[in-house]
Amino acid sequence: MDGLREAAKLLAQAQRVAVFTGAGISAESGVPTFRDALTGLWERFDAQSLATPQAFQDDPDLVWGWYEWRRHRVSSVRPNPGHHAVAAIEAHAPQATVVTQNVDDLHERAGSAQPVHLHGSLFAPRCSVCAEPATLPAPAGEPEDGRRLTPPACATCGGLIRPGVVWFGEALPEAALEAAVRAAAGSDVLLTIGTSGLVYPAAEIPRLAARSGAAVIQVNPQPTPLDPIARVNLHGPAARCLPELVAAAWP
Ligand code: BV8
Ligand code: ZN
């Protein structure tokens, strides 16, 4: 049976579905994936060194400028058919949980009710000193790629506002990680979509699902370290494969 038919059969029969997404699901909306996020000025920097507390401490204007550029980019694009297909899975499956590594809001804007954000969000800035949530001005004109921007000051304590994302070396939000582990361990099917499966502990999620007996279906144009644990590998772009999968599972 070809991959799509087998995946559709698994999905249609599943009672509890976990959907695990990475930057690849937002690629066709025009959001650069993590590894090629560094377009323009950012080519000189390695994302993994910019997405750290140290980088923010050393040069808050550079880091804040990068995140504000990314937030404006996300606000200026739209969810793609891949995001909408994930919302359709949530509507059809008896029980479904969306867990994302992405810090964009495209799942929400496509209709997913409460995606679990393992790595936080571009839209939840907070004070780097007292952790007070901060409100951000609606994106004005997109800061041109790579402009430095001075982070606003916290209204409560005057500390620097930081992006509400999880940086390398920072712990994931406990509640989010727990919800993701519960969803993976309890799933019959886990769909892993558009992730290189390289960053931990998030990358444990699909592996945990497989260990717990779930059938893992991977959607990615490239091979990844998750290939061996996938029951089905759909080698194609999410914006094409996911709508095809939903149409085949629930004709
Ligand atoms: C932590 C937010 C400890 C910020 C991100 C073992 C255990 C625990 C930790 C570690 C460990 N080993 C190493 C570590 C440290 C580190 C880590 O994993 N390093 C890696 C590089 C080895 N982990 C951490 O630091 C984590 N913290 O462990 O803290 C701790 C514990 C207690 C107390 C204190 C400390 C925190 C990691 C979180 C980092 N933050 N994002 C921001 O966005 O700026 S990570 C970021 O990169 C993403 O969120 C994502 O998780 C990760 C990888 O990105 P992907 O989403 O996979 O995207 P990528 O670009 O890599 O790939 C895109 C894929 O899409 C590709 O496969 C491509 O083929 C595919 N694709 C392209 N187009 C399409 C497509 N697919 C479908 N359709 C398409 N059209
Ligand atoms: Zn503060």
Image (cartoon, rainbow, N blue to C red):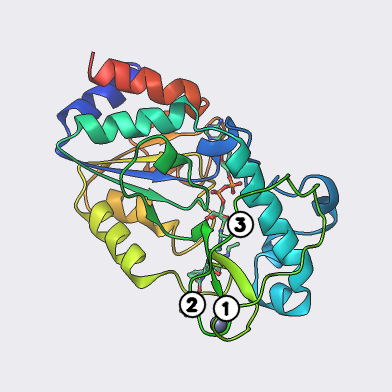
Question: What residue did someone put label 1 on?
Answer: 155
The secondary structure type at the circle numbered 3 is: loop
Q: Earlier in the sequence, mark 2 or mark 1?
A: 2
Task: Answer with left or right where residue 180 lies relative to residue 223.
Answer: left
Question: What residue did someone put label 2 on?
Answer: 132
Question: x%, y% of residue 171?
Answer: 47, 74
Which corner quadrant of the image does residue 68 belong to?
bottom right
Task: Answer with left or right where residue 183 lies relative to residue 100.
Answer: left
Residue sitting at 39 percent across and 21 percent down?
243
Crowd class of label 3 (few under 14; some 14 to 19; many from 20; radius 10 Å): few
Question: What residue did someone put label 3 on?
Answer: 137
* Residue type at numbered disc 3: Pro
Question: x%, y% of residue 181?
Answer: 29, 60
- The answer as to whether callout 2 falls within 8 Å of ligand 2 is yes
Which corner quadrant of the image does residue 109 belong to?
top left
The secondary structure type at the circle numbered 2 is: loop
Crowd class of label 2 (few under 14; some 14 to 19; many from 20; radius 10 Å): some
User: Looking at the image, do the residues carrying marks 2 and 1 touch, with CB atoms under 8 Å apart?
Assistant: yes
- The answer as to whether callout 1 falls within 8 Å of ligand 2 is yes
Is residue 99 in sight in this rendering?
yes
